[in-house]
Image (spheres, rainbow, N blue to C red):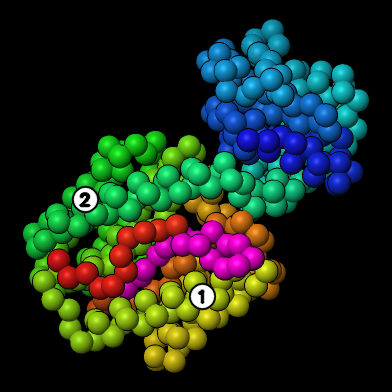
Amino acid sequence: MNNLKRIQDAICAAGLDALLLIDPRNRYYAAGFPSSDGAVVVTRTRGYYITDSRYIEAAQAAVGDTVEVLLCDRENPMRARLKAILSDCGVEKLGAEDGSLTYDEYLAYERSFGMKLIPSQKLILGLRQCKQPEELVFLRAAQDITDRAFAEVLPLIRPGVTEQELAAELVYRMLRLGAEGTSFDPIVVTGKKSSMPHGVPGDVKIQAGDFVTMDFGCLKGGYCSDMTRTVAVGSATEEMRKVYDTVLEAQLAGIAAARAGVTGAEIDGAARDVITRAGYGEYFGHSFGHSLGLYIHESPNAAPNNHEPMPEHTVCSAEPGIYLPGRFGVRIEDVMHLTRAGAEVLTQSPKDLIVV
Ligand code: ZN
Ligand code: ZN
């Protein structure tokens, strides 16, 4: 993975001498190693990873020879190490993460280094929007685990099982299938609760005639997956089928409209039009999709207010929903990889209404 070089090119283009990365995922992106504590300095020609004795050995093994790993300890605290690197490299224009750092931390670095930092969150996030082939390998692997966990959990969905039990099964199976963890706490909601897009799983038991919505994902190689399926238990009324089919039609319309170069608003609009025409416009309150990668929610969004073209190789969710308060809800979510030619859907699980 040569993200270091990509960052260096971007630093040069932005007129910076170096970039300071503290956010663990940005450090992972830059140097291939995610310690809970540490700092990365990327200069125009070099990379430095500073961490403590807990991580030093693993960091040395992970970062390769393009990045120099330096130990910080009581005699050489992190800030002093950083200051020395900046002065050795003659750094005068230092970019920093104005979004990830707290205001307090930002000011403390400015005081320690005796210089004003240059807000550069956008620079690193902009690079992270375009997924590299090595990153896509992990995004696909995470999605594959999620698909397989769903297939394993489907036969367990029946009356009497609680939302929490199903959520636990999803997590357990994703871990068994090789996930490093979950990308967010799974959402499992049944019956009336399925009208809450981000409801929290509880001790509510599944009943015959319910819709069950499951929204879940895992981490593989540090990268997130995200998927939602809504299934019917025992049977579905005509109205439930109508709502389900509308959401599916909207999702397919959004996916058909999605490709690199079209705006987030156009993708969202293609799906929203289907739902509005079916008379459910007011019951689709959120946006069509969000990007994901090292974080479950990244920019850009496939949302009505995003009038920027989607970049090539963005990985973005496609998740319209209809939520009828106090009655039921449906959401269907896949993950797409956007190219100039169109959207490649990474999620493989079936989408026609499943009645278990
Ligand atoms: Zn989701
Ligand atoms: Zn999502």
Residue that protrudes farthest toward the front in the picture:
341
Side of 138 where 157 appears, left or right: left
Cβ of mark 2 under 8 Å from ligand 1: the answer is no
| Stretch in magenta | 330-345
Question: According to the image, label 1 marks what residue?
Answer: 256
Magenta: main secondary structure:
strand
Question: Is residue 314 or residue 278 the one in the foreground?
Answer: 314
Q: Is residue 329 shown in magenta? A: no
Q: Position of residue 355 (x, y in %)?
A: 17, 70
Q: Real-space Cα distance between discs 1 and 2?
A: 29 Å
- Mark 2 lies on residue: 152
Decide: few, some or many residues near mark 1? Use Cα within 10 Å; few <14, some 14-19, many ≥20.
some
Q: What residue type is labelled 2?
A: Glu
- Look at label 1 and name its amino acid: Ala
The label nearer to you, 1 versus 2, is 1
Assess whether residue 338 is covered by the magenta stretch. yes
